[in-house]
Image (spheres, helix red, strand yellow):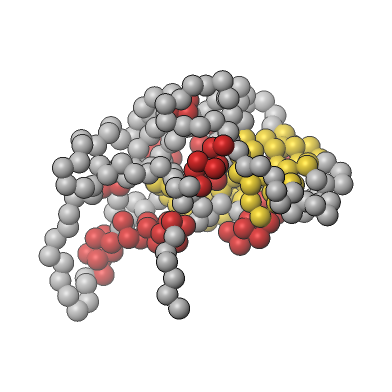
């Protein structure tokens, strides 16, 4: 049965679609020939923004990845060129980090991220894309990286939910005092347990073989493969088991309308 492709489905195949000309050249186009390629971006588009440098600050910060430079050997984005949508809030420190796991559970727990180091393992290469990746000059708010981390379910399995606790709210440090022209504060997202299990969601502490940088969520970031970056919460400091009717944050409601 045919079904309408939604944005999440598009994200799963979009990286390959964007690289079509690369793979076409590599495969030699059996049964056909390559006539040429078109520039990335729409006709008459505005000049592309500067690539590989952070523009703006806080919630308005951006670093765009130049997709036109991709080759079959550079599909994984170097960390310094991986897109940034929001830079690290000032109150995130390099001190010991604890994730509060609570909500509708029998016994809340405070889990020091250092205590999970033995569980960190390679989680594979995954693409993250901003839900607002709509600039036709490059669509540069999308990148791929190799991640190391901890399966989120391994942390959730340490607590026993109450009967009403059916969803999982993941929150990160946010600066609600910031004024932004492009973003809505509120770094949190609510998932069903099935969503997280199906996506093999994980908490990442390493990116491309090195410790996670501050602007990419250090010391710990949620990655939900196949979901937009707005659901991949940075600077995770709280995980709550919540009821089915829990109210989503304003930022997640705005972002979900783009999916």
Left or right, 20 with respect to 214, comes to left
The spot of residue 69 in percent (x, y) is 27, 47
Seen in the picture, residue 84 relative to 145 is either above or below; the reply is above
Along the viewing direction, whichever of 120 and 201 lies nearer the viewer: 201
At x 58% / y 33%, what residue is drawn? 186
**Furthest-right residue in view?**
106
The spot of residue 200 in percent (x, y) is 60, 58
Q: How many marks?
A: 0
Q: Can the viewer see residue 27 in this picture?
A: yes
The quarter of the image holding the N terminus is bottom left
Along the viewing direction, whichever of 149 and 43 lies nearer the viewer: 43
Left or right, 145 with respect to 72, comes to right
The spot of residue 143 in percent (x, y) is 40, 47
Seen in the picture, residue 123 relative to 207 is either above or below; the reply is below
At x 67% / y 35%, what residue is drawn? 237
Picture quadrant of residue 222? top right
Along the viewing direction, whichever of 212 and 188 lies nearer the viewer: 188
At x 62% / y 30%, what residue is drawn? 173
At x 44% / y 71%, what residue is drawn? 3
Q: Can the viewer see residue 211 in this picture?
A: no
The spot of residue 15 in percent (x, y) is 37, 56
Picture quadrant of residue 199? bottom right
Left or right, 77 with respect to 226, comes to left
């Amino acid at each position: 049965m045919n079904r309408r492709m939604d944005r999440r489905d598009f994200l799963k195949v979009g990286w390959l679609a964007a690289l079509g000309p690369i793979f076409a050249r590599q495969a030699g186009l059996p049964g056909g020939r390559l006539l040429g390629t078109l520039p990335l971006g729409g006709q008459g588009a505005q000049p592309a923004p500067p690539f590989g440098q952070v523009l703006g600050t806080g919630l308005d910060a951006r670093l765009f990845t130049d997709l036109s430079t991709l080759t079959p050997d550079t599909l994984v984005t170097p960390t310094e060129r991986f897109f940034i949508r929001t830079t690290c809030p000032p109150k995130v420190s390099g001190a010991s980090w604890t994730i509060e796991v609570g909500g509708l559970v029998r016994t809340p727990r405070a889990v020091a991220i250092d205590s999970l180091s033995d569980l960190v393992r390679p989680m594979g290469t995954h693409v993250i894309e901003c839900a607002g990746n709509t600039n036709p000059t490059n669509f540069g708010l999308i990148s791929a990286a190799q991640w190391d981390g901890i399966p989120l379910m391994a942390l959730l399995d340490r607590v026993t939910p109450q009967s009403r606790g059916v969803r999982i709210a993941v929150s990160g440090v946010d600066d609600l005092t910031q004024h932004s022209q492009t973003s809505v504060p509120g770094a949190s997202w609510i998932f069903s347990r099935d969503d997280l299990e199906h996506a093999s969601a994980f908490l990442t502490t390493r990116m491309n073989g090195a410790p996670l940088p501050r602007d990419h969520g250090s010391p710990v970031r949620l990655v939900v493969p196949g979901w937009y970056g707005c659901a991949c919460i940075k600077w995770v400091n709280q995980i709550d088991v919540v009821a089915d009717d829990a109210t989503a944050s304003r930022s997640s409601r705005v972002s979900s309308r783009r999916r």
